[in-house]
Amino acid sequence: MKDKLVVLWISRDEEAAINMAFMYARNSKLKGWWNEVELIIWGPSAKVASENKNIQEELKELKNAGVNVRACKACADKYQVSERLSAMDIEVLYIGSILTDELKSGTKVITV
């Protein structure tokens, strides 16, 4: 069984992002609850990440804690924020098939 968690962040809600998605992802990595932890920025969260300074600071902290942060390119392109996310040192790539492979391989995924 894979010891990997993917947190799929889709919400515009800053409180849900910071107090649930980011907190759990960070603690999961720092406390060793999961060996590998990834946060995927998907849909409206791409726009939020590109504009909200509090969220940007939190994303930096996640990366510093060892959480792999990626963004869906199709979503980021739709919101015209791909370049901004890339400038934040976030990997921006087409993620649909990657997420599908993770789901099929047994990776645990939670959505916020």
Image: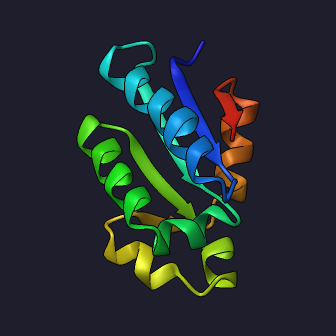
Tell which of 105 and 17 is nearer to you: 17
At which x and y percent is residue 105?
Answer: 69, 28
* Rendered view: 78 above or below 69: below
Q: Residue 28: name its quadrant.
A: top left
* Rendered view: 1 above or below 53: above
Image check: 111 left or right of 87?
Answer: right
Give the number of marks.
0
Image check: 70 left or right of 13?
Answer: left
Tell which of 19 and 77 is nearer to you: 19
* Rendered view: 80 above or below 72: below
At which x and y percent is residue 15?
Answer: 57, 45
* Rendered view: 49 above or below 77: above
At which x and y percent is residue 99?
Answer: 68, 46
Q: What residue appears at the point 69 percent right and 23 percent down from the top-left corner? A: 106
At which x and y percent is residue 32?
Answer: 36, 14
Q: How is the image coloured?
A: rainbow
Q: Residue 57: name its quadrant.
A: bottom left
User: Is the N terminus in the top left, top right, bottom left or bottom right quadrant?
Assistant: top right
Residue furthest front in the image: 15
User: Is the C terminus in the top left, top right, bottom left or bottom right quadrant?
Assistant: top right
Q: Residue 34: name its quadrant.
A: top left
Q: What residue appears at the point 59 percent right and 73 percent down from the top-left corner? A: 47
Image check: 109 left or right of 85?
Answer: right
Q: What residue appears at the point 39 percent right and 23 percent down from the top-left corner? A: 27
Q: What residue appears at the point 48 percent right and 39 percent down from the top-left corner? A: 22
Residue furthest bottom in the image: 80
